[in-house]
Amino acid sequence: MSELTFTLLENGLDYLQSAVEHLESKEERRLKYAIRDLFSGISLAFKERLANESWCLLFENVDEADEKKLVSGHFQSVAFKNCILRLNQLEEEMISEEFENILYVLRDKRKNIEHYAISDNVNSLRSLSYKVLKFTLGFISNKLEVEGSEYSTSISKLREKIISYASYRKKRLIEIKGKLDEYDVIFKCPECFNETFPLCTENRTCLFCFHSEVDGESLAYSYRSNVLHISSYGIAKGRQDEVLENCLECGTESLILGFDDDGHICFECSEVYSHDSIDWCSKCGQIKSGSTEESICSDCWDNIMDKD
Ligand SMILES: [Zn+2]
Ligand SMILES: [Zn+2]
Ligand SMILES: [Zn+2]
């Protein structure tokens, strides 16, 4: 089996190399190939780790694992989500939750590139790509036995690329530090994943990648899906809790519950709520102010009064 596992990593590194070449190109259209190849590269690195444990784990359905199918390639290989699940079963937090979220964003972008269209900001795609590349090389170095192997040279070359992007990133962060300091609340940008998105009612733009959102609702939605990786599907299935609510101040669906340890925040009007300043109506379940003694909301009160 060792022959096969070597091929996986070799192939993965080749995709990463290709991703870097696309990333370095001045041609913006090549970024989509960078995303595509980066995703293939990381998927193969993950599979290499699974194969090191047992080649059976490369099958989506382990019960169908069969050496002949494996050699011929005629089998359904493990899906990306299951791949991460299996890695985390092998070792707790092998892929941290934070990174898992970022990887799903990359996966979705790749899907959009291949099947739909792409309208992303170049700076944020580049930033996301380097972040994933850095993570992938760390994964390869720490979780796959590559030290002193034939792959060392290509890994070092890839690492050099990351170092040069890291110095560009550092320079940019220094440049925008003064501007960032003008804001009270800064959060993680849902596109480039740098902590460079200021909470501001006039202009909703990341100071690092210049990704911008038209209003608080769309920003809160992007934050929910990309940073927190909470989907309407997950909520409907009861696997995730909804964190988006209607703001009591501005009425838009821009309030992120449990934004940080201090409480909740509205991405539209920037209102900050402490944990106990918000409550839920015991009758209809809708959000209400926590500062009143009443356990039901004003709408429910009005309803009761109307009936009398
Ligand atoms: Zn950004
Ligand atoms: Zn609001
Ligand atoms: Zn109510």
Image: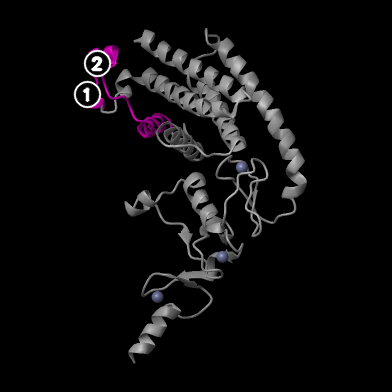
Which residue matches tag 2? 69
State the image coordinates of residue 53 (x, y, percent, origin top left): 37, 20
* Mark number displayed over residue 282: none
* Rendering colour mode: one colour
State the image coordinates of residue 163 (x, y, percent, origin top left): 67, 24
Extreme-bottom residue of the structure:
308
Crowding near pointer 1: few (<14 within 10 Å), some, many (20+)? Answer: few
Residue 63 vs residue 14, the one in the foreground: 14
Amino acid carrying label 1: it is Glu
Query: Which image quarter: residue 135?
Result: top right
Residue at 58% from the left image edge and 27% from the top image edge: 134
Q: Are marks 2 and 1 in contact (CB under 8 Å)?
A: yes
Magenta span of residues: 62-91
- The answer to whether 251 is drawn above or below residue 172 in the figure is below
Which residue matches tag 1? 64
Q: Is residue 77 magenta?
A: yes
Amino acid carrying label 2: it is Lys
**Of the image marks 2 and 1, the number of the one nearer the N terminus:** 1
Residue at 49% from the left image edge and 62% from the top image edge: 253
Residue at 39% from the left image edge and 13% from the top image edge: 5
Looking at the image, residue 180 sits to the left or right of residue 249; the answer is right
The alpha-carbon separation of the residues under discs 2 and 1 comes to 9 Å
The chief SS type of the magenta part is helix
